[in-house]
Image (cartoon, grey):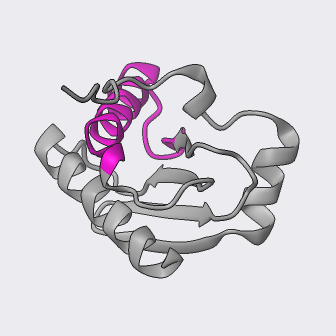
Amino acid sequence: MEAQAPNTLPKTERLCGKISISNLLAKGKHGSVEGMRYLFVSDTGNEGNRIMVSVPKKLFKRAVKRNLLKRRIRESYRKQKHILAATGVDVLFMYSTKEVLSYEAIYAAVGQIIAKINERVS
C-alpha cells in the first residue's frame, strides 16, 4: 500500500525571509479571482511550494477578523495543495474584499487560483 503525503502545512511550506518575499514581489506574475488576488513566481529552486497569506489592515481593523480569514485561506490551500502540479512555486494570497467570505467561498477561490497557476506554469 502506498503512503499518501500528509495533509499538513509545515514551516518549510511557508514563505518567509526578506529576499524570498522581495523576489516574489519584484518578479511575480499576478492575477485575481472573486474576492482574492494572487502573486506567484515559479522555478525558485526549491523542491517544494511555499505560500504567504495577506489580509490588509486597511480592510479589517480588528485582528480577530484578519486572523480568521488567514486561517481559512491557509486551510483551503492545505486541503488543495496536491492539485498544484508544479514544484518550486512561491504564492502570495491577498484577500481583497471588505466582506468576510464564508469558508466555502474562500475554498473555491483558492481552488481557482491553483488552477490558474497550473495553466500559466505549464
Position in image of residue 91 (x %, y %): 55, 53
Position in image of residue 65 (x %, y %): 35, 27
Q: Judge by depth and name the residue closer to the eye, 88 or 58.
A: 88
Q: Is residue 79 rendered to the left or right of residue 16?
A: left
Q: Judge by depth and name the residue closer to the eye, 94 or 74.
A: 74
The image shows residue 29, relative to residue 79, as above or below, that is: below
Q: Judge by depth and name the residue closer to the eye, 31 or 41.
A: 41
Q: Judge by depth and name the residue closer to the eye, 43 or 66.
A: 43
x 76%, y 47%: residue: 21
> What is the tally of numbered marks visible in this picture?
0
**First to last magenta residue range:** 54-82
Name the quarter where the N terminus is drawn: top left
The image shows residue 120, relative to residue 86, as above or below, that is: below
Q: Main structural element of the magenta stretch: helix, strand or loop? A: helix
Position in image of residue 55 (x %, y %): 48, 41
Say whether residue 99 is magenta: no
Say whether residue 68 is magenta: yes
Indicate the quadrant where residue 102 lies: top left
Q: Residue furthest front?
A: 1
x 36%, y 45%: residue: 81
Position in image of residue 50 (x %, y %): 58, 42
x 41%, y 60%: residue: 85
Q: Is residue 29 rendered to the left or right of residue 66?
A: right
x 80%, y 66%: residue: 26
Indicate the quadrant where residue 9 lies: top left
Q: Is residue 18 rendered to the left or right of residue 33?
A: right
